[in-house]
Amino acid sequence: MKNVLLNCLKQLVILILIGTLSGLIVGLYQLGIQNIVRISTFMYSSKEPFIIVILIFLVGFCAVFNNFIILKDKNIDGSGIPSMKLARRKKLPVSYLKDIPYQILNSYASTFTGFTLGSEGPSVVLASKISYGVNKIFKNRNETYDELAEGVGFGSAFLSPLAGFCYSIEESLESKLTFCKIISALIMIISAYFITTLINQNHLLNLVSFSQISLNDCYIFPFLLVINLVVSVFFIKLMLFLRAFFIKHSDNKLVKFRSFPLFLPTFILNLFLLSFMQSGGKLIGNVNDYTSLVLLFSILLLRFMLTAFSGSGDVTGGLVIPIMALGAINGQIVSVISTSLFGLEPSLYPLINLISALMLFSFTIQTPFTSIALLFSTIIYTTNSLYDSLSALPLFTLTLLLGYLIMTRLFKIKSLYEGMIDVTNKYNKSENH
């Protein structure tokens, strides 16, 4: 009995420590990202020749630094989520002492340069690797903590413990869901939330204001469903094609150092099209100002290609916010057309764009309940109104679940991360044979 109690106390200490350290490190990481975005935006917006010269030097340094770090540690390529999941399934050791600082520094380099990549993916990986490190220090064999900790990083990045909890549960559904897992996830997420909110107050999805959708405007949901399903399928297919191509030709020097050519167009595009670049967080909030369909389709195509190539281009950064940005553009396209054809009120654009952003995220990553939780927490954060949050959820939930069934049952398409893992496994096996 005494040993059981001592083990329960040990597990509680480990869970609180994982949550606390994750909240601390992810909070500091997110705070650093915000400051780097401010500096980068200032320099790209400047017309001073001296500032531009410094910017060119710094972007060049980031390109060299990125390649040096990636060659030393392949585990931080992209968001790092597929590599982390693959290592966990094959029970490979994780170099957390090396991976954590490298992940943070290289994410800062890609953020400063202005790549269309986000900070939420690295946040997920950071929390999982912190869990791995704490378990190793305490000689604890409960590997489910590393999996559940992904939600801790996600929730800390979005300042939404509810979304973090849903992400933990959805990501751990491949193994048996138990009451112990639920309690463990809650302890870690609550511990992290109290710490990270002391450091970081920036919600990655922040609406200034919005109007609620009435029953008369619900016709817009089928259109949002269709456009986001189409974009999701094409995005997943392109990402998997690029991953397979780059793995297959990994010995080619142009492929091996493919991030170098990406830095130059990213730099040029940020100089002239800054409002459409970077992770897409600002674009999600500002896209409702664009009413030209030609412009909207151009932005969609530009960011679609940039996000796909950046996400598979040997640079560090997440895909969640960039995917949401694509979804927000889809929402604005549908909204502008609906205004022209059916007289949709422009005051509805912000909420429709948020709903569309979360739809595309849900269909691509296949985490519908995380998307529902994010919509709820974002509206609560904006309005402090429980009624406004709950009134938007029923139809959104039905649409998400329908889209999820279409993706998984009708199209039989796996989530982006699972697809990337399958591609990696396939080509690794072929190389071994």
Image (spheres, helix red, strand yellow):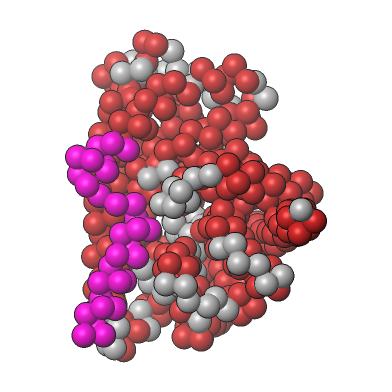
Q: Is residue 425 magenta?
A: yes
Decide if residue 295 is on the left or right side of residue 100.
Answer: left
Residue shown at the point (44%, 56%) measured from the top left: 319
Quadrant of the rendered structure where residue 231 is? top left
Query: Which sits in the foreground, 354 or 386?
Result: 386
Q: Residue furthest top?
A: 216
Query: Which sits in the foreground, 180 or 113?
Result: 180
Query: Which sits in the foreground, 119 or 37?
Result: 119
The image shows a total of numbered marks equal to 0
The C terminus, quarter of image: bottom left
Q: Is residue 143 magenta?
A: no
* Residue 252 picture location, percent across and down: 27, 87
Residue shown at the point (30%, 71%) measured from the top left: 425
Quadrant of the rendered structure where residue 112 is? bottom right
Quadrant of the rendered structure where residue 27 is? bottom right
Residue shown at the point (59%, 62%) measured from the top left: 142
Decide if residue 216 is on the left or right side of residue 191.
Answer: left
From which residue to which does the magenta span run?
404-433
* Residue 160 picture location, percent across and down: 62, 41
* Residue 65 picture location, percent across and down: 54, 82
Q: Main secondary structure of the magenta part?
A: helix
Q: Could you tell me if residue 278 is visible in this image?
A: no
